[in-house]
Image (spheres, rainbow, N blue to C red):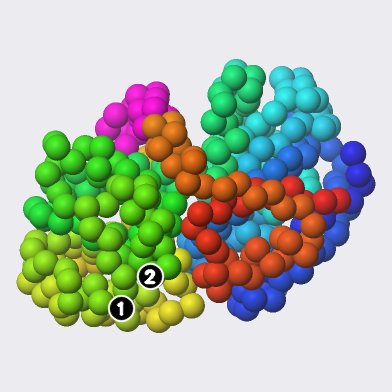
Amino acid sequence: MSSLNTSFIVKKEDLFRAKFSKDIIPILKTNEIILEIEKYAFTSNNITYAVTGKTLGYWNFFPAKEPFGIVPVWGFANVVSSKNKSISIGERYYGYFPMSNYLKVIPKKINNLGFIDDSNHRRKLPFVYNHYLRIEKENDKLINYHPLIKPLFLTSFLNYFYLKDENFFECNQIILTSASSKTALSLAFLLSKYKLLDKKKIIGITSKRNIKFLSKINFYDTVLPYDNALQKLNLSRSVIVDFAGNSDYLNKLYKYLGEFLNHICLIGLADWSSNMDFKSIPNSKFFFAPSHAEKRYKKMGVKKTTLLANKLMKEFILKIKNHIKIKNLSSSKEIHELYINSLKGKINPRNGYMVKLNK
């Protein structure tokens, strides 16, 4: 194990200013372990973490020296040093990590499924981000898709049941913006799976370049380009699930649909650099997945919720894996370019990026 930890850090008030930094790995105390981060996914979801880092507290998970922060990611890591009697060197975990080589944690509530990080600065942060899942054996052929798909799918899984609990706000059609994003695709999959039961028309709005891609996946009833969606949308009772975060465009949809728009659910910020004045949009509400996870656990139970989510996620991965090309990156130049291109919204939805940061 190296004595230095390399991290990719971002200036909080100017997200385009990013660089690599090195820090000395701290000496372990009793009960602590060090995880070497094996690989992680980088998606539009991570850009949302950066954009809302201050307002939703994402900068608090892995603090960096001000004025910089570390963007959280989902991935795999291996225990390389341990002063915890219940955790051995070589164990592998899936969970929430910094864009770094190493992470020191204080495991608590350890069992054969994993542990909770009890580091002081994380105790008041949402539980769903502090749980590390132990990976026993590579008998799941889809396991390598988990960092790429699982966080996004769980958000849409929770959103689907939120909409269902609300009787879909009595709508006839559900409109998804940024329809080619993996989070939107996850929700479209769930809506299409239960369409015979829910009887809702599924409409995707996306860039022209992504229409052919979405037609192959076939989760949507209709796919429309942003520039003429307003001319082709039916005036029918509607719910918008917004993954783009462009409040100017949402206002146009609101004005067009008028009294037919029953609800706007704000989830993603794929178009984060656009105007994000959501307070001016009537009938809109931000969807914070961790809060809905707690509600779902109370309603269905943790075990039942987890089993159902995992079952549906596997079905989803099997449906889309042949449409997604995994690209593995490792050099500092590749990682920096991926981050900047993601900020600019220049990522091909057909690609899934897995990162292993070189030391």
Q: Which amino acid, by three-letter code, is at mark 2?
A: Lys
Image position, residue 72 (x, y; %): 61, 54
Q: Earlier in the sequence, mark 1 or mark 2?
A: 2
Residue topped by disc 1? 227
Q: Main secondary structure of the magenta part?
A: helix
Q: Which mark is residue 41?
A: none
Write the residue at 61% across / 69% down.
341
Work out whether 239 lies above or below 90: below
Q: Is 306 included in the stretch rendered in magenta?
A: yes
Viewer-side residue, 119 vs 233: 233
Which residues fall within the magenta stretch? 295-312
Write the residue at 78% across / 45% down.
102
Q: Is 210 included in the stretch rendered in magenta?
A: no
Q: What element does badge 2 sit on?
A: helix
Q: Quadrant of the N terminus?
A: top right
Work out whether 216 lies above or below 190: below
Image position, residue 246 (x, y; %): 37, 75
